[in-house]
Image (spheres, grey):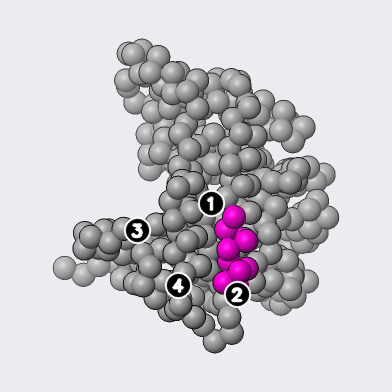
Amino acid sequence: MKLAKRVESLPPYLFAEISKKIAAKRAAGVDIVTFGIGDPDLPTPQNILAELHRASDDPANHRYPESEGLPELGKAIADWYDRRFEVKFTPMKETLPLIGSKEGIAHVALCFIDPGDIALVPDPGYPVYEIGTMFAGGTSYKLDCTRESGWKPNLDAIPEDVARKAKILWLNYPNNPTGAVADIAFFEKAVAFAKKYDVAILHDNPYCDVAFDGYKPVSIFQVPGARDVAIEFNSWSKIYNMTGWRIGMVVGNETMIDALMRVKSNIDSGIPQAVQRMAIEAVYGPQECIDEHNAIYQRRRDRIVEVLRRVGLEVDTPKASLYVWAKLPAGVTSADYAARLIEDTGVVVTPGRGYGLNGEGYIRLSVTTPDDRLEEGMRRLEAWKGL
C-alpha cells in the first residue's frame, strides 16, 4: 500500500501530539495541569442547552440537514453581524454555517488554490492555513510577523512577483497564538492590497468577543469595499462556549461564499439541526454570559501574566483572545522548554515553534484552565528550577 504524497508529507497536528503526550503522562500516574488548548472550560449557557433538549425531541431534526443550514440560522448570522458590527449581510447568500469554523478554514483553499498557486500565510499562525493550502496543491508564502511589528505582516514587503501570483491572504485578529489585535487602518491597507493584486482575503475572527479592559475587536467588513474581496470566519465556540457542538460561520463576498458552499455540499451533509437551533438561541437569547466569561478570562490572564513575568519571561498583556504569549530567555527553544516543563512539573504549555519559524523562542498558555488547576499550575511554575 502506498499513501498519497500529501499524507506522507503531512506533519502531525500540533494539538494531537500534545494530547498524546498528556495521555501518556496521565497513564503513568502524573497529575497534569494543561494550558495547552484554547477550549473553554466554562459550560455552554443553560438557555442554549435547553434549546438543544427541546429541538432534539423534534423528529424534523432527526433527518439529514442541508449543507446551507436552516434559513432561520442564516438570518441569525446576519442579525448577529448587524448587532455586533453594524454590518448587513443577505442571509443564505452572504452567510454560511460551518461544522465549526475549522472545517471551513481547512476546505476554503479548495475554492481558490490550484496546484502551484500561492497562499500568503502569516508566521506565526494557525497551522490549518498552511495545511489547507497544501491539501489543495498550493504553496504557502510565509509572511513574517514579529513582536516588533505587533505580530502583523508588512504587506509592502511582499515581493511584487509573489503578490501578483498570490491567490489568497490569511489574516487572524485577535490573533492565535499571539493575542495581537489589529485596527481598522490595518484592514484598510489589507483591502487595498487585495484589490491591487486581485487577492482574496480570508479573515479568521473567532475571538472577536473574547476581549478585555474595554477593548472591542473589529471586523474587516467595517472597512468600505471589503465585501468585494473578503470573507470572514467566525464561531459560536469561543463566544458562547460551544466548542464541543461544532458550529461556526463564514460571511462576506457572495461569490466566495457560494464557492465554499459548493465544496461543502460535496463533502458534508450539514450541521445537525438541533445544534443549529442552539446557535439561533445563542444569538437571540440573553447575552450577559459574554461579559461574565470575559471577566473570568481576564482575571486568569492577569494571574498568568503576573507569574510568567515573575519567573523571568517577557509578556505583552493581550487585549483579546484566549491566550498569553510569552518570550523565553535567549537560547532556550520552545520545544525544549515545553518538554522539560511537563517532565519536571506536569505542566503543559504549547511551544511557539508549532505555529511557525517566528514562533520559536515563545510559548503559548491558554486561559481556559479552571481556577483551581490554574493556581496549581502557577504554583508549580514558580517553584520550578528548570531555567
In the picture of the structure, the residue carrying the numbered disc 3 is 32
- Front position in the image: 94 or 259: 94
Tell whether 224 sits left or right of 335.
right
* Residue ID at (59%, 55%): 303
Rendered view: 323 above or below 66:
below
Residue 324: x and y in percent read: 59, 59
Residue at left offset 63%, top offset 57%: 179
Q: Decide which of tag 4 and tag 2 comes sooner along the chain.
A: 2
Choose mark 3 or mark 1, whichever is in front.
Answer: 3
Residue closest to the eye, 191 or 332: 332
User: Residue type at mark 2?
Assistant: Gly
Is residue 51 at all visible to an observer of this figure? yes
Could one spot residue 114 in this view of the protein? Answer: no
Distance between the Cα atoms at labels 4 and 1? 20 Å
Choose the circle earlier in sequence order: 2 or 1.
Answer: 2
Lateral position of residue 15 relative to residue 219, left or right: left
Q: Which residue is mark 4?
A: 384
Q: Amino acid at mark 4?
A: Trp
- In the picture of the structure, the residue carrying the numbered disc 1 is 367
Q: Position of residue 20 (x, y in %)?
A: 29, 61
| Residue furthest left in the image | 1
Disc number for residue 113 = none
